Image: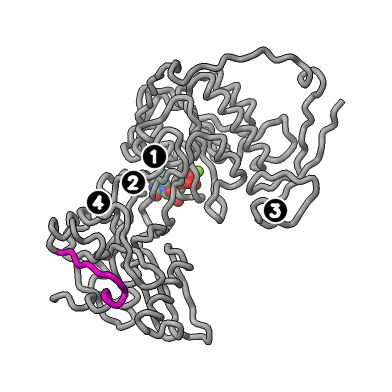
Amino acid sequence: MAKDKTVFVCQNCGYISPKWAGKCSNCNSWNSFIEEVQIAEPKGLNAKSQHIAGNAIRISEISNKKLDRIQLPYEEFNRVLGGGLVPGSLVLLGGEPGIGKSTLVLQSVLKLKGKKVLYVSGEESENQIKLRAERIGIQNEDCFIYTETNIEKILATIKSTEPEIIVVDSVQTVASEALTSSPGTVSQIRESARLLQEYAKEFDIPVILIGHINKDGDIAGPMSLEHIVDAVFQFEGDNNHYYRLLRPKKNRFGSTYEIGVFEMINSGLKEINDPGNILISDENVGLSGVSYGTLAEGTRSLMIEIQTLIGNAVYSSPQRTATGFDSKRFQMILAVIEKRLGLHLSQKDAFINIAGGIKVKDTAVDLAVLASVISSYYDKPIQDNTCFIGELGLSGQIRPVSFIDKRVSEVFRLGFKNVFIASSQKSELSKKYSGIISVSDVKDFASKLFSLSQ
Ligand code: TYD
Ligand code: MG
């Protein structure tokens, strides 16, 4: 008889090691190994059994099965899903605790009438879920709640209830009794997801899994879970702000460019169909160090507000702090300004903050950061209604960015008057709009920045 083995599994990436180690050699995370028992597969019978040959078919002969997507009641959610929830798919929704994952899913299934839904919760009691439902204020007779963490029991209940949509909140709380490791470990999460997936595919029922994320922003536990599921979405935002972005990380049935925008209000989440300027406020207009840029997100463009503070260094080594912006990129921009414009930034503390609690990765924001640093350095406000779109190269040149048409038209639609862009993107746009200012490098930019007529 084969023996069960004890192995050590990295809880971050699922790497298996025969010995305990402080650092995972696969994903470099520290202290991530947990001892788990690997149940031996019975050998003999299976290993030697003769397999019957399967049938391979031509791709052209595969019938085009129409995907009858289930339309959720929120357009923002449907669009991010790629046009609705695909039957038989396994969808993972990740996000920090308290961001509103349970609220988003519960209110989507409550508002969806005529579909039987089973909402399995391993985190909250029936009463807590009822309270949330009351707060959201939607009644639905087709929504069933089941509080349980044992996946075998959950599957049995699913089979007897026969729901048309299944929700599991959260995947980290469910566990199989066939495994000895505790809930939340890689093997438990993987096993539970596998069992749910089997059911989903067999009966063509969609399953929404809710998962927590760790400090690095990955779904806590297994990256391997992201391979099993069909789609992974992150629900993000800042607990101190009301806006929430639903962002796809992987989607087998749609693009990963779209984002969904929601606002957390007293009665749950409200979708925002025209989010162009939700992230900017009027409060900081006319202050030095404040500038505006754009983020291209799928078919949309969002305006963002950048706040920078450049001050005399308090300690011998100047501080560099970036919130919502990549700190390495911020340092690069500071270095380019120092070298190409001769501003003495190495003696200064520099802080940057993206308003609204969102995290920016779009390099088209570089030019807006550049503008806010220069404005704060000279303590001189930038002319009202001005926006900056461009990427900064190490040699100081301003480079073209993607989706420039979409960005510029949104900026003007929202009432901005002047837009700085890279000179290489000027030709078409300046024919169309009158407020285009093109710049070729940082020197050219600095000379034009404060020369706008007031
Ligand atoms: P929740 O959905 O429980 O978050 P998660 O499942 O991601 O942990 O949302 C929790 C937060 O949302 C909580 O701090 C309160 C806030 N909230 C509202 O502001 N309004 C509401 O109507 C609801 C239901 C929650
Ligand atoms: Mg929750």
- Alpha-carbon distance for marks 1 and 4? 18 Å
Residue type of the residue flagged with mark 4: Lys
Residue type of the residue flagged with mark 1: Ser
> Which labelled disc corresponds to residue 24?
3
**Span highlighted in magenta in the image:** 435-445
Compared with 310, 75 (above or below) is: above
Res. 17 visible in picture: yes
Cβ–Cβ under 8 Å for marks 1 and 2: yes
- On screen, residue 162 versus residue 179, left or right, reads left
- Alpha-carbon distance for marks 3 and 1? 33 Å
Residue type of the residue flagged with mark 3: Cys
Secondary element at image label 3: loop
Q: Position of residue 422 (x, y in %)?
A: 27, 64
Residue type of the residue flagged with mark 2: Gly
Secondary element at image label 4: helix
Cβ–Cβ under 8 Å for marks 2 and 3: no
Secondary element at image label 1: loop
- Alpha-carbon distance for marks 2 and 3? 35 Å
> Which labelled disc corresponds to residue 406?
4
The residue indicated by pointer 1 is: 255
Q: Earlier in the sequence, mark 2 or mark 3?
A: 3
The residue at 38%/45% (across/down) is 257
